[in-house]
Image (tube, rainbow, N blue to C red):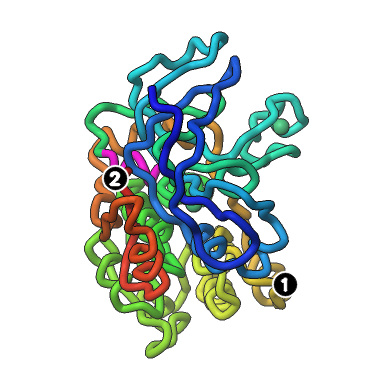
Amino acid sequence: MAKGMQALVKTEPGPGLAMMEVPIPEVGRRDCLVRVEATSICGTDLHIYRWDAWAASRLRPPLIVGHEFCGRVAAVGSDVTEVSVGDYVAGEGHLFCGRCYYCQTGQAHICAQGRIIGVDTDGCFAQYVRMPAANLWRLDDTVPPAIGAIHDPLGNAVHSVMAAGVSGASVAVVGCGPVGLCSIAVAKRAGASAVYGVDVNPYRLSLAQGLGADAVIRSDTDDPVESVKDLTGGLGAEVVLEMSGHPAGIRAAFEMLRKGGRIVLLGIPPGPVQADLTSWIIFKEARVLGINGRRIFETWHRMAELLRSGLDVSSVVTHRFSLSEFEQAFAVLAEGRCGKIVLVT
Ligand SMILES: [Zn+2]
Ligand SMILES: [Zn+2]
């Protein structure tokens, strides 16, 4: 095997990324080397690309970025038995210690020592990525690489929808980025009585319609709270999935929730947000669920079952580029006329 590979590297603190040749990672006894077939760009990667305050506080360059991928196992460490060379896999990008309180109680996704590939350690915007064998998930051969690559955001959606419980319920999804779009399809598949998509971006609302939304609401021209109340006989939605992270979106999400309803908070706000606990939560008897990542591997099993049973999220992927066309890909993402962007290596 060659010694070098192409990778997208944050070489030093500051905006941008560099495509460069770097050594192929060496595998430890419990690691695997994966030949990346497809990888997708996350909002997190845009923060890193632009080098905002969060990125500057968290990343320690030089670092290969990217955390969403699928590919084929190219090499395994001496103690690896669960996967073999040639296996088609996706990766759980949240690294966990396996020994802390959270890992021992079935909550490895919120491990006390949790780290994320492409943020805290080298990631997958490269021809190869090194992963602990414990973080690999074997994909069915029927899963196309573009879908294998988006298992991370699809898993966020599955975890959110399953945590909220949507069977027979009206569901409003605030923020129709890739996780919101996947959530619409998953909620429909999971038996929601109706799903409403809310966003300011008309392109994303058209994708939401294609994924099965019963109605879409453009929140910069229509009042999203009144619109959802109109659609639900004045009650508001029984379940709200807040996936925008925008303070105005968070406010609207709580206000459109009916009394006794369930609200998932997944979108990450840019800073502290003022909340009216009395009217948003206490008097409403709202149940508020924070969601972070994917349950390892409960969410992944559910994802596999849903895909096998016909869940179709292929229209979430709107653009494909080669890894070397990353500047074009980030420009499309920054503009927002896109769903998920996949990079093929
Ligand atoms: Zn991501
Ligand atoms: Zn742990």
Q: Where 53 falls versus 192 (above or below)?
A: below
Q: What amino acid is found at the position of numbered circle 1 in the picture?
A: Pro
Location of residue 96 in the rendering, given as x and y in whole percent from the top left corner: 65, 33
Which secondary structure is most common in the magenta stretch?
helix
**Left/right of residue 250 with respect to residue 38 in the rendered view:** right
Residue 3 image position (x, y, % from top left): 45, 28
Query: At label 2, which amino acid type do we have?
Result: Ala
Indicate whether 99 appears above or below 239.
Answer: above
Q: Give the label, 2 or 1, closer to the camera.
A: 2
Q: In the rendered view, does 286 fall on the left or right side of 22?
A: right
- Residue 224 appears in the figure: yes
* Furthest-bottom residue in this view: 221
Question: Where does the C terminus fall, quadrant-wise?
Answer: top left
Asked whether 24 or 49 is in front, the reply is 24
Reply yes or no: does residue 150 show up in magenta.
Answer: yes
The quadrant of the picture occupied by the N terminus is top left
Q: Residue at the spot x=40%, y=80% of the render?
A: 200
Q: Is residue 77 left or right of residue 186?
A: right
Tell me which segment is drawn in magenta. 145-151
Gap between marks 2 and 1, in whole Å? 35 Å
Looking at the image, which residue is at 30% across and 57% down? 316
Q: Position of residue 309 (x, y in %)?
A: 26, 35
Say which mark, if any, is on residue 218: none
Q: Which residue is drawn at 58% across and 39% down?
A: 94
Q: Nearer the viewer, residue 149 or 293?
A: 149
The answer to whether one can see residue 298 in this image is no
Residue drawn at 60 percent across, 64 percent down? 268
The residue indicated by pointer 2 is 146
Provide the residue designation for mark 1: 272
Task: Examine the rendered structure and indicate whether residue 156 appears above or below residue 341.
Answer: above
